Amino acid sequence: MAALWILSNIGALWVGWGADAAALLATPPRAGLVVVWCVGGMLTSVFTGRLSVAVWAACIERRVVALERTGWQRVKIAVFGAAWAAFLVVLAKADRTGRWALPETLWPFRYIGLLAFVAGGGVRLWAIRAREAADARHVLATSGPYSRIRHPEYLGILLVLLGLSLVFRSVLGLAVWCVWVGVILVRIPREEREIIDGPDALDYENHRARTARLLPGVY
């Protein structure tokens, strides 16, 4: 399943790029992103118990997708998957045509994007492993990246989206990233209120006192 998910992502980029698909890999940052995506996707599948699509869909309704497989959840995953594929197609097409794209003279941003993509994927994998270990013990996740920030999975997702947008120099991608920043900033306080009203309230209050939400010293 993980291999299918990875291939579908790479396939969407190829579709967006068009006839000369080999040119997609002509730029080192794009080629590096494809390699990292393949390796990172397989590592996520091997070292965690959740599918990448479920992790991403959980941004909208966290944990529910990973725990339930109702008909409505399947519909949401399908809709998200289609929207995500369309997003990748648009990114690649923007880079190929130069429409709604950052100027090519800003090429260093491609490398910054690749670094952001790698960092985001690493943070996500680290966070998922830490939270799954905590869930197995039925305790609050406070180890790994959770020892510094309370929502490392969200941080990882934002870095991945930012990285993709910069590697493909997509203005639309950056606009979508800004929307996701807004969605996550709204979602985080709601999630925290739910936890505070739950059985882990005391532990979470102590955890909040010594951690940041997304960026230490900033937010």
Image (cartoon, grey):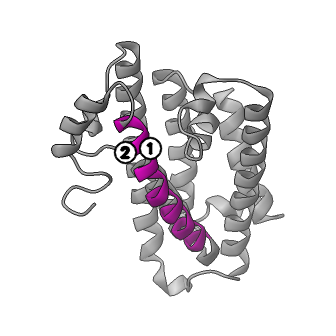
| x then y, percent, for residue 90 | 73, 66
- The range drawn in magenta is 173-196
The mark that comes first in sequence, 2 or 1, is 2
Residue under the image location 21 percent in, 46 percent down? 211
Q: Could you tell me which secondary element the residue under label 1 belongs to?
A: helix
Say few, some or many: other residues with alpha carbon within 10 Å of mark 2 (under 14 / 14 to 19 / 20 or more).
Answer: many
Which image quadrant for residue 130? top left
Task: Determine if the magenta segment contains residue 75.
Answer: no
Q: Amino acid at mark 2?
A: His
Q: How many marks?
A: 2
Residue under the image location 34 percent in, 37 percent down? 196
Task: Determine if the magenta segment contains residue 188.
Answer: yes
Q: Amino acid at mark 1?
A: Glu
Q: Quick check: can you spot residue 32?
A: yes
Which image quadrant for residue 5? top right
Q: Could you tell me which secondary element the residue under label 2 belongs to?
A: loop
Residue under the image location 45 percent in, 49 percent down? 190
Q: CA distance from mark 2 to mark 1?
A: 10 Å
Q: Which residue is at the front of the view, 160 or 211?
A: 211
Relative to residue 96, is residue 143 drawn left or right?
A: left
Q: Quick check: can you spot residue 121?
A: no
Q: Which residue is mark 1?
A: 191
Which image quadrant for residue 134? top left
- Return the residue found at the far right: 19
**In which quadrant will I find the C terminus?**
bottom left
Q: Which residue is mark 2?
A: 151
Magenta segment main secondary structure: helix
| x then y, percent, for residue 47 | 45, 23
- Return the residue found at the far front: 197
